[in-house]
Amino acid sequence: TGQDLLGRTVLVAGASSGIGRAAALHLAGRGADVVLAARRTSALEEVAAGVEDRGRRAWALRCDLSDAEDAASLGERAWRTADGVTSLLYAAGHLGFSAVGGDPASAARTFAVNLHGFVAVTEYLTARWRDEGTAGAVVGVSSVSSTLSPVAGLEYYGASKAAMAQYIRCLAVSLARHGIRANCVAPGIIETPMGDAAGPEHRRGWISRIPAGRVGDPREVAAVLGHLLSGSAARTTGAVLRADGGFGLGDVAPLRPGYPEPASAQAAPSDAAR
């Protein structure tokens, strides 16, 4: 991949940890300057230092994407701070579990972060790109839970991620004639704070149904995100790419005890995924 993202300025929402953090560092390694947005300022500063260690510029913006005003202003703030943004990577997410009878607060926060914040930032940036003739790119982080129901209690999370994926498909149709692309990635269970929140019992059950035989690394997902933002994906729009080790293929029976472990099960991500 080399420095194929030189000249790009990418806004990474949800950049303080997990997939967003890995993606920000991966993009910097490929030559992009990065605007980092999340709630935790100290974590953002650490990621910014990592971007700068890779020889690229970084700007850290505190933003609570569950707050409608914060989300609505993020695109403009990022544009003004970096003197332009050419791409959006939306990795912010909230794993809100639902309960029998409903939980309005959990529902509101989950949809605010996973969908409404994404829409607000996307619509500001895509309008600027359209008006200025910029061939921008949007990539969202959805989830295999957008099409599967792997565990009870994911009504809000699954619905919000499914809505993101369908929004992306429709957006791609509307913006293709302006040279603007929109895609998303649907990870399975990944070694992130959000992935850990599911708990050990659910985690064991999920791993038993992953044909690849292991949980994913955020850097592997970052490599897929980087591809979709790059010129290598110039003809790709409206796509939802799974990055899940085969988990999203559907009704995979649990791997029987003694099932041969895949040769790559414990392999570290290649340099291309770092």
Image: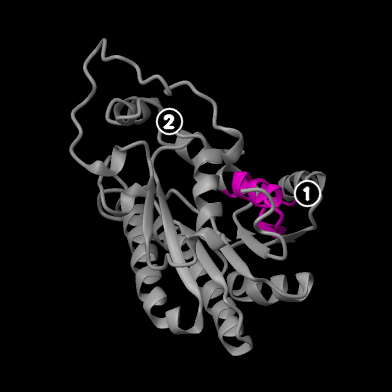
Please indicate whether residue 47 sits to the left or right of residue 196 in the image: right
Please indicate whether residue 216 sits to the left or right of residue 22 in the image: left
How many numbered tags mark residues here?
2
> Which quadrant, please, contains the C terminus?
top right
Q: Name the residue under label 2.
A: 215
Magenta stretch contains residue 44: no
User: On the image, which quarter does residue 257 sit in?
Assistant: top left
First along the sequence among labels 2 and 1: 1
Query: Label 2, label 1: how many angstroms apart (C-alpha)?
Result: 28 Å
Front in this rendered view, residue 42 or 184: 184
What's under tag 1, amino acid-wise?
A: Glu
SS class, disc 1: helix
Image coords of residue 10 (percent x, y): 65, 63
Which residues, given as a range, are shown in magenta? 20-41
Front in this rendered view, residue 73 or 209: 209
Query: Which residue is rendered at x = 67% and y = 71% of the image?
Result: 85
Please indicate whether residue 148 sits to the left or right of residue 83 in the image: left
- Disc 2 crowd rating (10 Å Cα; few below 14, some 14-19, many 20+) is many
Front in this rendered view, residue 123 or 268: 268
In the picture, the disc for residue 45 is 1
